[in-house]
Image (tube, rainbow, N blue to C red):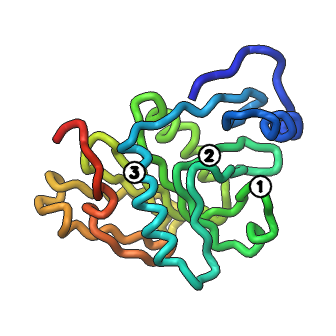
């Protein structure tokens, strides 16, 4: 993300009205807007692999996956983000036309310019959503997925999936997205992806 400018701060409604007129997407936090930077081919392919897997799994169920063009609102007052992939199973979101407010799952594909925000301020803000249960951070450079899950005690637990750490092949590493009860191999996320460190 790139900060647009340090001109006067916008209200949430001013941002929503203004962004509709823009050719680019902008995220919004604390009155400031940030232009969304373009991703790499690996970034796009990983997000598409995950979104298409979710779409196939959720077909006919009361859940809807979305990709990067779908806006997420932490509240009516913001912040507003564009996660790489998210799923909502909440009936309230079915009535919305432009913004998802009640996701259960969010995934971000990491890049050097966004990783700090994805791990930090975004994750802190995502945790303010009462329906949010699972957060995936996916590396675009190496086969590595970190998933944070909200346990029954209200604590976020981390599980890491990578061939070196799990001492097995990517095809044998089973990722279970508990928020939507989906199992798939790690290798599926990286199908047709050329990794930097390979």
Q: Which residue is mark 1?
A: 98
- Expressed as whole percent of the image width and height from the top left, the position of residue 180 reads 50, 74
Asked if disc 1 and disc 2 are in contact, CB closer than 8 Å, the reply is no
Q: Which residue is mark 3?
A: 45
Residue at horizontal 66%, vertical 29%?
Answer: 34
Q: Secondary structure at mark 3?
A: helix
Q: Secondary structure at mark 1?
A: loop
Mark 2 or 3: in front is 3
Q: CA distance from mark 2 to mark 3?
A: 17 Å
Q: Which residue is mark 2?
A: 82
Residue 133 in the figure: left or right of residue 18: left
Residue at horizontal 72%, vertical 58%?
Answer: 101
Report the disc number at residue 114. Answer: none
Q: Secondary structure at mark 2?
A: loop
Considering only order in the chain, which callout, 3 or 2, is on the residue closer to the N terminus? 3
Would you call the spot at circle 1 few (<14 residues within 10 Å), some (14-19), or many (20 or more)?
few
Considering only order in the chain, which callout, 1 or 3, is on the residue closer to the N terminus? 3
**Splitting the image into 4 quarters, where does residue 78 fall?**
top right
Q: How many labels were placed on the picture? A: 3
- Expressed as whole percent of the image width and height from the top left, the position of residue 196 reads 24, 36
Query: In this view of the protein, which residue sits in the foreground, 140 or 174?
Result: 140
């Amino acid at each position: 993300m790139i900060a647009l400018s340090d001109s006067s701060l916008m209200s949430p409604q001013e941002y929503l009205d203004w962004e509709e007129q823009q050719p680019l997407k902008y995220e919004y936090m604390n009155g400031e807007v940030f232009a969304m930077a373009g991703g790499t081919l690996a970034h796009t392919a990983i997000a598409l692999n995950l979104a298409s897997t979710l779409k196939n799994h959720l077909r006919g169920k009361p859940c809807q996956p979305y990709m990067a063009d779908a806006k997420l609102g932490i509240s009516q007052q913001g912040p507003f983000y564009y996660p790489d992939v998210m799923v909502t199973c909440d009936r309230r979101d079915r009535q919305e036309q432009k913004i998802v407010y009640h996701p259960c799952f969010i995934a971000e594909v990491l890049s050097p310019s966004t990783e700090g925000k994805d791990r930090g301020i975004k994750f802190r803000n995502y945790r303010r959503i009462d329906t949010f249960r699972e957060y995936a951070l996916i590396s675009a450079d190496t086969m590595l997925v970190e998933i944070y899950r909200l346990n029954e005690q209200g604590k976020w637990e981390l599980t890491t999936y990578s061939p070196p750490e799990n001492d097995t092949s990517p095809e044998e590493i089973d990722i279970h997205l508990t928020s939507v009860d989906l199992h798939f191999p790690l290798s599926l996320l990286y199908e047709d992806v050329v990794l930097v460190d390979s």
